[in-house]
Image (cartoon, rainbow, N blue to C red):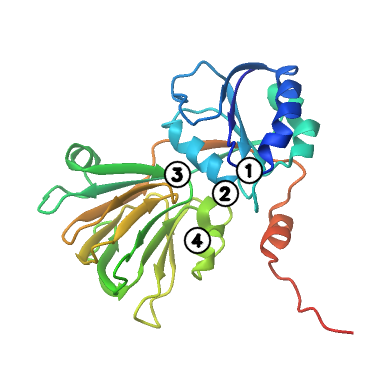
Amino acid sequence: MKVVVVVNIRKPKMLPALDELLPWVQARANVVAVDREAKLDLATVDADGVLVLGGDGTLLSVSRRLKGRQLPLMGVNFGRLGFLASFTPAQLKDHFENFVAGKLPVSSRMMIETSVLPVGCKCNSHDYESVKAQRRFASIALNDAVITAGPPFRMIELELGANGDTGVRYFGDGVIISTPSGSTAYNVSAGGPIISPDVDSICITPLCPHSLSFRPVVIGAAATVHILAKRVNSGTTLFCDGQDSTPIQAGERLVVRRSDRDVLLVENPQAQEWQTLAEKLHWAVSPQYQK
């Protein structure tokens, strides 16, 4: 297997480990490139797989840089939680040769694509070719697309709907549109549900809505979500995976749909979904009583 190694050298634990780890990897695979500065064109490089040394944020960045190319990603966690980058450095050594041999399980993770249509655009939100032709900004995300109120931090007004519905208008601090993979990220901290990665769905979670009855909603992955910015702040911004962003103006429309291409994520055979939730999120942990 031809492997590209993407390294996040900003991780504190990375540099001490890299001098030993990189020669070990190169002795067991045909390493065609080592990308330390996030400058390599991953969409065209001659490779069969990507080894990501960093954390979940590094893996999110790599998933977008692939631009839909179907290369399996093996994420090794040098960060904190490591939901997507599910291998530890020690586990890398246990499983890397099986990765090179194509023997590790690979899951197909859905991504979402967000388009921003300028003020006055009359195109049909469900006509994808028309949206592509007229949008001023587009980005894909493995985790989520988030509209945040931004400075001066007054409530904003959005109109939100799906599949041609008129939509509902609400006030709040924004909205999260997440994939199942991203449900354990910003979505869950905002009160949204945890969704299994093998469930094809999109989750809509309002941020601090000015309504006690506006709860998170899970819809089918084939749905098209449309959001109209009715009233926003000067700092209101769209963030895709927390990394790609653009300011949002009143009157602009956002169209969120499932991307045409998924991401191939190499799964850690030692990890179990519920065990991972319990270990990393302390999910369902009982209170600790004093003796």
Pointer 4 or 3: first along the chain: 3
Which quadrant would the C terminus be assigned to in this image?
bottom right
Residue at point 59%, 55% (across, down): 196
Residue 122 percent location from the top left of the image: 11, 50
Label placed on residue 111: 3
Residue 102 percent location from the top left of the image: 68, 24
Residue 47 percent location from the top left of the image: 55, 18
Q: Which one is nearer the viewer's eye here, 228 or 245?
A: 245
**Image vertical order of residue 117 relative to residue 159, above or below:** above
**Disc 2 to disc 3: CB gap under 8 Å:** no
Disc 4 marks a residue whose amino acid type is Tyr
Residue 119 vs residue 281: left or right? left
Q: Residues within 10 Å of mark 2 (few under 14, many from 20)?
A: few
Q: Quadrant of residue 93?
A: top right
Residue on which disc 1 sits: 85
Residue at point 71%, 70% (across, down): 284
Pointer 2 or 3: first along the chain: 3
Pointer 1 or 3: first along the chain: 1
Q: Which one is nearer the viewer's eye here, 158 or 222?
A: 158
Residue 146 vs residue 186: left or right? left
Label placed on residue 198: 2
The secondary structure type at the circle numbered 3 is loop
Label placed on residue 97: none
Residue on which disc 4 sits: 186
Q: What's the CA distance linking mark 1 and mark 4?
A: 17 Å
Q: Nearer the viewer, mark 1 or mark 3?
A: 1
The secondary structure type at the circle numbered 1 is loop
